[in-house]
Image: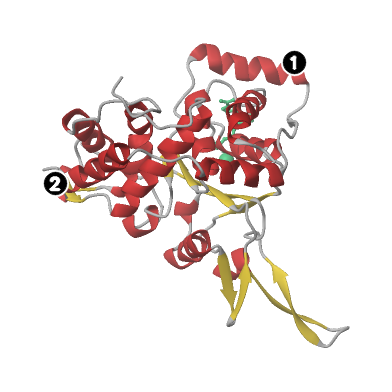
Amino acid sequence: MTGLSEVPHKARAVLDEIERAVVGKRDALTLVLSAILAGGHVLLEDFPGLGKTLAARSFAQTLGLEFRRAQFTPDLLPADLTGSFIYDQGKAEFEFRQGPLFTGLLLADEINRTPPKTQAALLEAMQERQVTVEGETFVLDPPFHVLATANPVEYEGTYPLPEAQLDRFLLRVGFGYPDSEEEWEVLRRRLERQREEQTLNRIVTKEELREIQAAVETVTVDPDIGRYCVALAAATRKHQHTLVGSSPRGGLALMLVARAYAVIAGRDFVVPEDVKAVAVPALAHRITIRPELWMTDISGRSVVETVLGQVPAPTARDRTGSAR
Ligand SMILES: Nc1ncnc2c1ncn2[C@@H]1O[C@H](COP(=O)(O)OP(=O)(O)O)[C@@H](O)[C@H]1O
Ligand SMILES: [Mg+2]
């Protein structure tokens, strides 16, 4: 069994291994790993060519997960994801052929290029961890994680995800452009490798990943920290720039990701800094800004940043409960 005390070391080993492939994205990768350890799905929103596909593949390899990729084109149908019943001539019966949802880690690539019906099929599977095809239900065995990529909203020719569906992602993480040294490092490593593909070592098996996720679940969260998460989510609803703020699901996501983030940092208790570190990726995508502000710099991110400055954080306590 993988105990809680081994998790930080294993998490670091996973991130170090991924960094053999992905250059300079430690913070974003740590967030993605936090979401996976918390049992969730991640939306990677950024421009093409920033290493998102590479990162997804790297997570699958290091976490011992079967990897599948689905390209969300405008003509992708729900059955292309779930699978469908195919007639088997030999046996003279219908057989279920599994679609790409049946995997450990699914890279759902460019989900805002596909119409709402197919997006809904993905999001339902993420939420329910099962799919129903022609009245028959098939369970998606854990670990099952989706890393979805989306182009930034300003991008043309896309079907933006409705807020209700964005809410299903535990985190939304941006990669951002590398600085010029990092960008050169990407090129340099490619020359050194003398081939395109990169293969990483498996650091944990999928059974170990399940044990790690179970160990993270045993970490208790101080009620003050839980209430802080609630207060932050609620404050996004009252903000003057907000049309619709975070649902309670956002506060829950905030707490669960902060807990996994704390464990990766080597603690078995959550401090306000963990909550602050994950607040923007956990909450910003759940906030709808007033339409008259759409052409401005105001965004879900700016709302979360302001509420972080306004809502008083609880005093950090040590394990014995005394204020530090
Ligand atoms: N930060 C990075 N580290 C390593 N390689 C990168 C990075 N950013 C981009 N690349 C390289 O650029 C190419 C595009 O990356 P890819 O993962 O397909 O991007 P995306 O999925 O974001 O469009 C790949 O060859 C990848 O190896
Ligand atoms: Mg890609």
Q: What kind of element bears circle 2?
A: helix
Q: Quadrant of residue 24?
A: top right
Quarter of the render that holds ligand 1: top right
State the image quarter where residue 285 is shown.
Answer: top left
- Count the marks: how many? 2
The response on whether ligand 1 sits within 8 Å of label 1 is no
- Mark 2 and mark 1 lie on one chain; the one further toward the N terminus is 1
- Quarter of the image with the N terminus in it: top right
Few, some or many residues within 10 Å of mark 2 (<14, 14–19, 20+): some
Q: Which residue is disc 1 drawn over?
A: 192
Circle 2 residue: 238
Q: Position of residue 144 (x, y in %)?
A: 60, 53
Distance from the alpha carbon under mark 2 to that under mark 1: 53 Å
Is 280 displayed left or right of 68 in the figure? Answer: left
Residue 76 shows which numbered tag?
Answer: none
Three-letter code, disc 1: Glu
**Amino acid type, residue under disc 2 in the picture:** Lys
Task: State whether residue 81 is above or below residue 271.
Answer: below
Dividing the picture into quadrants, the one containing residue 298 is: top left
Render colour scheme? secondary structure
Q: Are marks 2 and 1 in contact (CB under 8 Å)?
A: no
Looking at the image, residue 285 lies above or below residue 269: below
Asked whether residue 152 appears in the rendered view, the answer is no
